[in-house]
Amino acid sequence: MDYTQEEKEYFMREALREAGKSLDKEEIPIGCVIVKDGQIIGRGHNAREELNQAIMHAEVMAIQEANRLEGNWRLLDTTLFVTIEPCVMCSGAIGLARIPQVIYGAANQKFGAAGSLYNILTDSRLNHRVTVETGILEDECAAIMQDFFRQRREKQKMAKQMDDADHS
């Protein structure tokens, strides 16, 4: 599963498009696509708030869709593209789905389990290891997250100011 730089950027842009769907719903904007034979077979975006389910991360949604399309829980010969480094739960799901390759945009210093805090995908103690590549469209992937959290902090600050004004 060798991809040209152009192909990697194309699929990461598709993952960014998925992240935009989360952003539209005021969810943490992370997006994911799973690719097999040059075709996207699974798409996902964060939907925890929308679906009121803690496990509805982008990677989990994409894995579920790819499982349905493939008619198999094993997603061999696939590549998962995700805008932000997978967390512990998603790294576990990636391994359990037997996805052999993960390409992510930006690191996740607070929850990352594919190089930042943990190395679940490459841990030799586990029976399935994943090839990991980072930094594809890193600036765009990081920026959508940074903008989201900056805007959320501003909204919270404004709400607090309004609340303080109401109590004055």
Image (cartoon, rainbow, N blue to C red):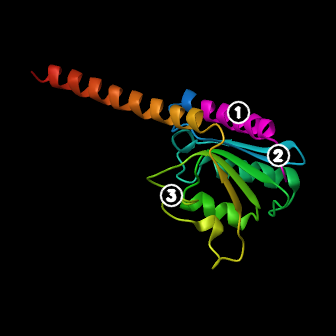
Task: Look at the picture and state if 7 lies above or below 68.
Answer: above
Q: Look at the picture and state if 115 lies above or below 151.
A: below
Secondary structure under the numbered disc 1 in the rendered image = helix
Contact (Cβ within 8 Å) of mark 1 with mark 2: no
Residue closest to the far front? 5
- Marks 1,3: beta carbons within 8 A: no
Q: Earlier in the sequence, mark 1 or mark 3?
A: 1
* Residue depicted at 16% across the width and 20% down the height: 166
Residue 144 is labelled as none
Q: Which of the 4 image quarters holds residue 39?
A: top right
Q: Residue at x 46, y 34 (%)?
A: 146
Question: Furthest residue to the left?
Answer: 168
Q: What residue do we see at 63% from left, 79% from top?
A: 125
Q: Which residue is mark 3?
A: 116
Disc 2 residue type (three-letter): Tyr
> Residue reaching furthest right?
37
**Residue 103 screen position, x and y as percent:** 69, 50
The span from disc 1 to disc 2 (Cα, nearest Å) is: 14 Å
158 and 68: which is toward the camera: 158
Q: What kind of residue is marked 1? A: Arg
Magenta stretch, overall SS: helix
CA distance for labels 2 and 3:
24 Å
Query: How dense is the environment of label 2, judged by Cα within 10 Å: few (below 14), some, or many (20 and up)?
Result: few
**Sequence-first tag of 2 and 3:** 2
Above or below for 78 versus 161? below
Front residue of 165/87: it is 87
Tell me the number on the disc at residue 13.
1
The residue beneath circle 2 is 3
Q: Which residues are magenta?
A: 1-21
What secondary structure is found at the residue carrying circle 2?
loop
